[in-house]
Amino acid sequence: MDPEVTVANRLDTLTSWHADWSGLRVGVLGLGVTGFSVADTLAELGADVLVVASNAEDARAGLIDVIGARLVRSDLDAPPAELLDHRPEVLVVSPGFSPTHPMLEWATEAGIPVWGDVELAWRVRDKVGTPAEWILVTGTNGKTTTVQLTAAMMAEAGLRVAPCGNIGVPVLDAIRDPQGFDVLVVELSSYQLHYLAGQAGEDKVTPYSSVCLNIADDHLDWHGSLEAYIDAKGEVYSRTRVACVYNRSDPVTEDLVRRADVSEGARAIGFGLGVPGPSDLGIVDGILVDRAFLDDRFTSALELTTIEELAAAGLAAPHIVANILAAAALARSFGVSPAIIRQALLGFSLDAHRIQLVLTAGGIGWINDSKATNPHAADASLRSYPSVVWIVGGLLKGVDVSDLVSRHAERLRGAVVIGVDRSAVLAAFERHAPNVPVLEVTTVDTGDVMTEAVELASGLAASGDVVLLAPAAASMDQFADYAERGREFTEAVQERWGGLTDERPDDQPPL
């Protein structure tokens, strides 16, 4: 590198895959799925890559030398000597590292620029030709479902589309796919958006359309305050060019659109379960309609599908219908026709662990919604059923479940509390729902938690009830992730009730 060229100036030039990345000294924090995709990308670009991680899966760690990078295992309480010797010109951080992490504080004090994986992906998005358009999706809940719905609608229209980001496929993997895409539907967590908000330079992420589905208390321990969390979520709308989609029942999302620095000509598009106004999507007499993307939107509407058709496909829970309307708004902004949207919905199925009916036995439905990892998600799930035995608890991430317990006390047949620290949940029931029978799972062994929970719930439930795993909490106190928690629940239900499964379709609980 020319000694006259400063680090900052050089970073400003790195806005293309085809720029000169050779020899750029990069530190990569973390070696999860995202961290590995960062290291692999930068090594392919010719950068000098040092990965620093406290935990590294053996399979990924074994590939670091193969891709031409180096790995240092460290507790990360302070920068290891190898990283100091590396003298990184930029630090690329995995989303889980909070701004107050010692490594980030060190980078700030040392004047080292910090990127997230999304900023890196935006810079190198032209690897395989004309860059794909980006559609961004965030929110406290419903992100993955909305991303999948949007991608399904676009794929049905014949577009080459990749759902990616926080959904499990790193954006960098989609960017480097040799087939290329017309559009990326990118799920972004508040962590990723926090680092995106710190982008420097002119080549900032400029989405085609974007949505913040909802806002509720979550990840407050990471962000430090609700205000900081909301600000991070609002970054999704920055520089949006075509449609800023917001939730008409959540005024915070509408306020975020108003505050956002969007591209000239971008429209605000609302979605909600009520009758839509002009420039909205909503429901009229059981019909999902679009009053935003048509010329005569003040007097007309376009039919997308019906609640009856969604119910037949298991997609009629209110929060899922809201996700469908949000996804339809994003797809319509890209020119996907109502007929194509309807066709895509006919073939769509929800992910495992999202209001998944495991089985119905003795008139009792067993529902796996392990992905309800915060009170907002659990609230939406509970609202879908009139009489519930609720399996709740886990790692609460600094939020309070008291309001949730109080709001749903009348619909609760009983509750089964799981989690290593159950005291806050038990106290909430004692204060706000003293008449609801509450049982406690005392085992802490992962393999036995759900077996005990299912057995206790079986003693509380009666015909017409659902037993709902919607923990309102993260899973890492007792499980690897929400998926393992859901699998353990499903297996325990099938072992306990599989031989007694009801055959009649009308025994299925309402969704």
Image: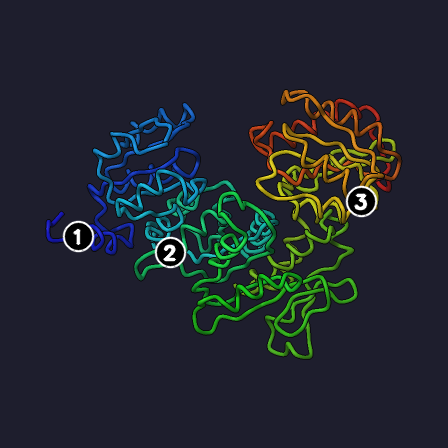
Instruction: Determine the secondary structure under disc 1.
Output: loop
Name the residue beneath numbered marker 3: 409
Q: Which mark is residue 6?
A: 1
How was this image coloured? rainbow
Quarter occupied by residue 238: bottom left
Q: Which mark is residue 472?
A: none
Q: Which mark is residue 131?
A: 2
Counting residues from the N terminus, which is met first, the one under dot 1 or under dot 2? Answer: 1
Look at discs 1 and 2 and give the one toward the viewer: 1
* Cα–Cα gap, marks 3 and 2: 51 Å
Q: Which residue occupies 29% across, 30% down? A: 80
Counting residues from the N terminus, which is met first, the one under dot 3 or under dot 2? Answer: 2
Counting residues from the N terminus, which is met first, the one under dot 3 or under dot 1? Answer: 1
Look at discs 3 and 2 and give the one toward the viewer: 3
- For the residue marked with disc 1, what is the amino acid? Thr
In the image, residue 202 sits, relative to residue 423, either above or below, namely below
* Cα–Cα gap, marks 1 and 2: 28 Å
Instruction: Determine the secondary structure under disc 3.
Output: helix
Disc 1 crowd, CA 10 A, few/some/many (<14, 14-19, 20+)? few
Q: Is residue 293 left or right of residue 272?
A: left
Q: Are marks 3 and 2 in contact (CB under 8 Å)?
A: no
In this orientation, which residue lies closer to the viewer: 42 or 409? 409
- For the residue marked with disc 3, what is the amino acid? Ala
Residue 86: percent from left, percent from top: 22, 35
In this orientation, which residue lies closer to the viewer: 345 or 370? 370
Q: Which residue occupies 79% across, 30% down? A: 457
Residue 406: percent from left, percent from top: 76, 47
